[in-house]
């Protein structure tokens, strides 16, 4: 594709990163976005680090060299956990690489500000939970009650659009025992953002749910500003989002549909 302007690339192992992109579109009105979902290789959460690094590198090459991207958002916690260091070493300083990670810090602030005593429950893929990056961030908050659960099948269930009842039963079985002790839940996988209602059903309205969406986009905006590479024209005449997927057109349609849904 021959773009006259430069774009912002977003990618995920499938549909999950759409939840991050949706918010970015609202915040950055003059930008054009290219989204790549790697549904053919989803889920990433059960793969090895080397496999994830290779997949991410191919996607970044596609976004940067074939789609004229000036910045990349790794809108997948698993990919960020596995590959962000490698991607930064390879592409920065030319291209800023922004990653998403479980929003533990805002959850800690919430617990502290409200003088709460309950647990913070972090939910993510096995790769994210077992990764060094997550362990390192946990070590910063040793004085807090943080529990983490790896949900091995959940990203796949959401990617495959399984029935909400099936997902509810799965989560109820895995998380039922935490319901009484938990004060907030951190969604550490971008796929999970699409089923916030199911989490609310399980934990009740008093439990606060955190995601990394706004924090990631705030960082994207900061990095664009530092480099002075924001688009300074009104892009009303441009199509704002181009979606690609490694699997098929059906997935692409689903992503466009999800972009039009509210993610609360
Ligand atoms: N959206 C990815 C994440 O945030 C999904 C994980 C996967 O593909 O296993 O971790």
Image (cartoon, rainbow, N blue to C red):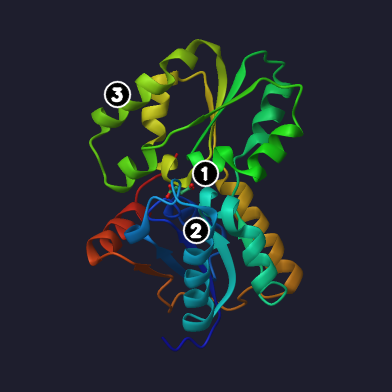
Instruction: Specify whether 242 is left or right of 128.
Output: left
Ligand 1 within 8 angstroms of badge 1 C-beta: yes
Residue 23, percent from left and from top = 50, 53
Specify the farthest residue to the top. Answer: 180
Whether label 3 touches label 1, CB < 8 Å = no
Instruction: Specify whether 31 is left or right of 43.
Output: right
Disc 2 versus disc 1: distance between alpha carbons? Answer: 10 Å
Instruction: Specify whether 193 is left or right of 60.
Output: left
Residue underneath mark 2: 52
The one nearer the camera, 167 or 133, is: 133
For discs 3 and 1, the disc positioned in front in the rendered view: 1
Mark 1 Cα-neighbour bin, 10 Å: few <14, some 14–19, many ≥20: many
**Which residue is painted at 53% across and 59% down in the image?**
50
Q: On screen, 118 above or below 235?
A: above
Ligand 1 within 8 angstroms of badge 3 C-beta: no
Whether label 2 touches label 1, CB < 8 Å = yes
**Which residue is painted at 57% across and 24% down in the image?**
184
Mark 2 or mark 1: name the one nearer the start of the chain.
Answer: 2
Residue underneath mark 3: 169
Quarter holding residue 36: bottom left
Visible residue check, residue 235: no
Residue 148, percent from left and from top = 56, 28
Tag 3 secondary structure: helix
Tag 1 secondary structure: helix
Residue underneath mark 1: 127
Residue 69, percent from left and from top = 55, 76
Residue 4, percent from left and from top = 51, 88
Q: On screen, 60 above or below 111?
A: below
For discs 3 and 2, the disc positioned in front in the rendered view: 2
The one nearer the camera, 117 or 257, is: 117
Disc 3 versus disc 1: distance between alpha carbons? Answer: 23 Å
Disc 3 versus disc 2: distance between alpha carbons? Answer: 30 Å
């Amino acid at each position: 594709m021959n773009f006259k302007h430069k774009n912002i690339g977003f990618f995920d192992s499938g549909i999950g990163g759409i939840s991050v992109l949706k918010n970015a579109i609202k915040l950055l009105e003059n930008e054009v976005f290219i989204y790549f979902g790697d549904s053919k290789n989803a889920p990433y959460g059960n793969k090895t680090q080397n496999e994830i690094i290779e997949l991410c590198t191919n996607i970044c090459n596609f976004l940067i060299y074939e789609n004229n991207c000036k910045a990349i958002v790794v809108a997948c916690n698993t990919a960020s956990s596995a590959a962000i260091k490698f991607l930064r070493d390879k592409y920065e300083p030319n291209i800023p690489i922004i990653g998403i990670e479980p929003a533990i810090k805002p959850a800690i602030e919430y617990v502290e500000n409200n003088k709460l005593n309950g647990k913070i429950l972090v939910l993510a893929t096995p790769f994210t939970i077992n990764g060094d990056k997550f362990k390192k961030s946990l070590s910063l908050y040793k004085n807090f009650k943080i529990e983490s659960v790896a949900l091995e099948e959940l990203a796949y269930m959401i990617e495959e659009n399984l029935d909400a009842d099936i997902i509810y039963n799965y989560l109820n079985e895995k998380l039922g025992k935490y319901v009484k002790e938990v004060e907030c839940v951190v969604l550490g996988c971008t796929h999970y953002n699409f089923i916030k209602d199911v989490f609310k059903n399980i934990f009740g309205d008093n439990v606060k749910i955190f995601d990394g969406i706004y924090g990631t986009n705030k960082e994207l905006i900061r990095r664009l500003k530092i480099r002075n590479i924001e688009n300074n024209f009104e892009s009303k005449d441009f199509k704002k989002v181009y979606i690609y997927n490694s699997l098929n057109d059906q997935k692409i349609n689903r992503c466009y549909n999800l972009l039009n849904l509210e993610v609360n």
